[in-house]
Amino acid sequence: MAQIGYFSIVLALAISLYGIIAFVVGINSKNKAFVDSAKGAVLAVAILGSVATFVLLYFLMTGDYSIQYVAEYTSNDLPIFYKFSAWWAGNAGSILLWVFVLGWYTVVVAFSKKTKEAAPHTSAILLFIASFFFFVLAYLVNPFELNPSFKPGMDGFGMNPMLQNPGMVFHPVTLYLGYVGFSIPFAYAMTALITKKADDSWIRVTRRWTIIAWMFLSLGNLWGAQWAYAELGWGGYWGWDPVENASFIPWLTGTAFLHSVMVQERKNMLKIWNVVLIAITFVLTLFGTFLVRSGVLSSVHAFSGGDLGRYFLAFLVFMLFASIYLIVDRRKLLVQESNFESFVSKETSFLLNNLVLVGIAFAVFWGTIYPLISEAFMGNKVTVGAPYFNSISAPLGLILFALMGICPLIAWRKASLTNLRQNFLWPAVVGVLVAVGLYFTGIKKPYALGSYAIATFTILTILVEIIRGMLVRHRLTGESYPLALLRLLVRNRRRHGGYIIHLGLVLMLIGITGSQAYALDVTKSLKFGEQMSIGNYKVTFNKLDQKVEGKKEIVYANMTVYDAKKGSYLGNIEPEKVFYPTTNEPSSEVGLYSTPKEDLYIILATWEDDGTTTFKAYVNPLVFWLWFGGYVLVFGTLFALWPGKGSQAGSKYVKLGNSEQV
Amino acid sequence: MKKSMVFVALALFMIVFPSTVLAAEEWETRQIPYDVESGVTCTLDKCYKNLAACDSSAGDVLRGVIREKMFKEGLSKEQTYAYLAQTYGDEVLAAPPKTGFNWIAWVTPFVATVGGGAVVFLGLEKWVIPARKKDNTTDKGETNTPITPEYEEKLNNELKRYL
């Protein structure tokens, strides 16, 4: 059985190489038979990748510890749900997941009827990427390697307890779907350059791919943050760990790309910039994969991959230079057809938005690799953690959120003073008033005030725009207000989906600001029946007990939460420490009492024989809005993506001589 | 005289000793402020977690050192960080110290963004100024054409068809 799995991988590598050659020959000789054969190769590669995957899943589910990977990541007592997720718990399995997704994505591209002309080149590029991953699986990290210390009746080492959480099951998959998804627009962009058809057709074709990849990357980061919050037990959700950064940086450049392509779609501008951005985004997804597997930076998320990092680095560098060569060589095709006509216009605001997004991406990238730079130049590796990233990204982030309010409402070509006043005066005034009001209620930190002022401004600009549209529609059609609102949103889902995404992001900003600037924390040792106070809560420690679930031993504290002012009962929570037989360090399950206003978050730290127990308690304001905003963002993305009338791009807005094509 | 000296010394010891014990207990158990703890990385035992997030015994060792320096010896946050960096290396700090070569870490992102902004501004200036001149010569008088009632009615009818 293991041979079937391994043979599938080797065969997939050989067929993907054949597919590349067949595509190249077919394209150059205009021989349809070769192209069709290559398309068959694409399908075969996807099927072989799936066969290898199903064989691995079979071993994982049946607990066949004669396979090294199964013995390393599962054990007899592991629930079936986590046996399945062990697929991506280790290095080899996660790369197999990558090729599984990439294989089927490539099938969709190769057999696409809408992009028949570009499909052969694009599929060849995707097969090239797949062949690298199959090479890695075949010769560097074989998932079907036999276990040299296998004995009948043995048990596996088990999964890292931190990974035994539903959040950690979905978080890696969504991240991979995002990472792999960005291969598609990249491949289409390179195809546009190779075939010298560098108009905006590749952008229109890849819009859905890009947005879906972006949505999965967003969701992957969101679920990663939720997992960290619930499972790592330190009161936070984003630690600016190198691996977290590696998934955040392509999200930032991907976001910049999503915005700048609109300028090319509407005004035939920023062509070279768009190709550069998607190439950078793709290379950054490889950088993330390299970082996780190379061990060059210390991270709680990293796999130990031996020499694997070097191969990823070589592939990354090759893809980077190949992209740069193509862009430089085809630069004349990428000359923009119209120019900026004013300092204040939608296109210049998009340019600023791109500048800030790429600026933040660079800042995070720079901070992530800085330990290597300091080691190279000073001989000692410094740590670059949360205090650095928070100070660097906060000012740029606030500018970005302000632009989020400005960009959608500013006119194309040239904005007049009247346009600016009409759209932004009142939201700006109310934003300032909110900041002043908050100042007098005790919120005095400048960043928090700035953040809430900008959040108010951005929410108001979006709401005013939607309400204005609804009123116009009501006036013109006579529809009731709710119907006018519904139809307004649905008839231009692309635009309003974007507004919903922006609203989601602003809600996330509100959550991040509240939880970062005004969190409370107390560490206290209690005996049974004693109380601790934090913020608006009084918490009574009722008992410390233990229970057994399978092979897990769980020590938990039962605590009752009361409203400190009213004394009313709010609920019971049970923070836990979970001990696994396979690891020395227990994992934490936090006790959480969550409301839209704030979270009471309690960690069971240590305990003595006499029952005296130490707790770390936090009150994290507004965290609920971070998660809620994240799901609003996902809803907005799906809303914009939903096919049919209303999801298309607007028409061109370029000057043709003295007339305008609108 | 000698007896009275011994008595006084003993009395003083009785008074001072319990209080020193209490003081020691007080500093040993005092809570480290979150902003101090989150500025430190637990580099002991290859943990590499932020100290605020670290609940291993290695983290407790570092917390003990911080308590001793801050609460027993009265060092400030910055002095405590300097001591930690001297003892465990710069790696123990969660952000590069703003000294010497490490200034590069702090300054580069802003320099790059401002530099990028300057390039964008210069590019815009190159494009916008000729466009303005062209507009002044070709579009004169066309921008503020009043909308007549007939035109507005036609526009509304068109809009109704497509809404």
Image (spheres, rainbow, N blue to C red):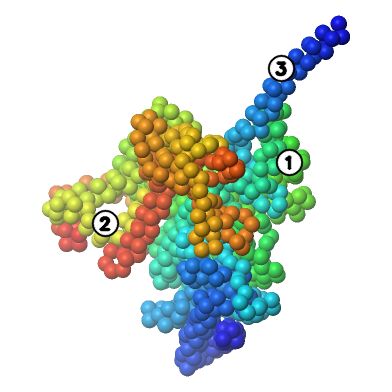
Q: Chain of mark 2?
A: A
Residue highlighted by disc 3: B15
Q: Secondary structure at mark 3?
A: helix
Q: Residue at x 63, y 79 (%)?
A: A152
Residue A478 rendering spot, x and y as whole percentages? 12, 53
Q: Distance of mark 3 from mark 2, alpha carbons?
A: 78 Å
A114 left or right, relative to A395: left
Residue depth check, mark 3 versus mark 2: number of the one nearer the observer: 3
Q: Is there one chain holding both mark 1 and mark 2?
A: no
Tell whether label 2 touches label 1 (CB within 8 Å): no
Amino acid type, label 1 = Ala
* Disc 1: CA contacts within 10 A as few (<14), some (14-19) or many (>=20): some
Q: Secondary structure at mark 2?
A: helix
Give A430 or A312, whichever is nearer the viewer: A312
Image quadrant where residue B23 sits: top right
Residue highlighted by disc 2: A489
Q: Chain of mark 1?
A: B
Q: Residue at x 40, y 80 (%)?
A: A112
Q: Which mark is residue B85?
A: 1
Amino acid type, label 2 = Leu
Would you place residue A203 above or below residue B40 in this image? below
Q: Is there one chain holding both mark 3 and mark 2?
A: no
Q: Is residue A264 visible?
A: no
Furthest residue toward top: B1
* Disc 2: CA contacts within 10 A as few (<14), some (14-19) or many (>=20): many
Q: Residue at x 74, y 52 (%)?
A: A375
Q: Secondary structure at mark 1?
A: helix
